[in-house]
């Protein structure tokens, strides 16, 4: 599945893994209103998508899997299963990139 994320880069980290270099990028998307906290997503790519503060529009491939983790309920003693969701956003293409805008300082 492909989606487009529009937001601001909060951080970019270069990581050396078994398959070579890749980048973990955190992007914040605007909140729905001024009382809500903006959502943040961790994206993975083979290239550096930008720098902290840049506003970007990124085409991403989304993949996921569910992993089951058995546990024993402390209250009832029953064996149960916790389902953990793992979602990966892989950047396919940079659609737009704007330089960070300066935020005026309070006087």
Image: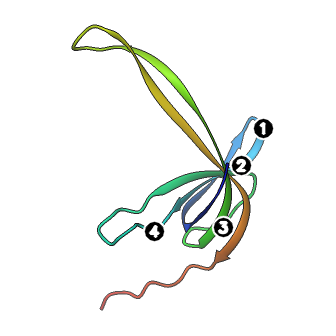
Q: Secondary structure at mark 3?
A: loop
Q: Which residue is mark 3?
A: 50
Q: Which residue is mark 2?
A: 22
**Distance from the alpha carbon under mark 4 to that under mark 3:** 18 Å
Say which mark, if any, is on residue 19: 1
Categorize mark 2 by other alpha carbons within 10 Å: few (<14), some (14-19), many (20+). Answer: some
How many marks overall? Answer: 4
Q: Earlier in the sequence, mark 4 or mark 3?
A: 4
**Distance from the alpha carbon under mark 1 to that under mark 4:** 33 Å
Q: Is residue 16 above or below residue 35?
A: above
> In the rendered view, does 83 fall on the left or right side of 92?
left
Categorize mark 4 by other alpha carbons within 10 Å: few (<14), some (14-19), many (20+). Answer: some
Q: Which residue is mark 4?
A: 30
Q: Earlier in the sequence, mark 1 or mark 4?
A: 1
**Distance from the alpha carbon under mark 1 to that under mark 3:** 22 Å
Residue 48 % position (x, y): 71, 60
Residue closest to the eye, 49 or 14: 49
Looking at the image, which residue is at 31% across and 8% down?
78
Q: Secondary structure at mark 4?
A: loop
Q: Secondary structure at mark 1?
A: loop
Q: Earlier in the sequence, mark 1 or mark 3?
A: 1
């Amino acid at each position: 599945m492909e989606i487009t994320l529009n937001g601001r880069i909060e951080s970019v980290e270069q990581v050396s893994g078994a398959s070579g270099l890749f980048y973990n990028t955190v992007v914040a998307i605007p909140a729905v209103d001024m009382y809500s906290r903006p959502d943040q997503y961790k994206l993975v790519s083979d290239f550096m998508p930008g720098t902290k503060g840049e506003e970007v529009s990124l085409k991403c491939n989304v993949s996921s899997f569910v992993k089951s983790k058995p546990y024993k309920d402390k209250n009832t003693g029953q064996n149960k299963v916790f389902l953990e969701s793992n979602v990966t956003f892989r950047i396919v293409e940079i659609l737009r990139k704007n330089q960070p805008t300066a935020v005026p300082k309070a006087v």
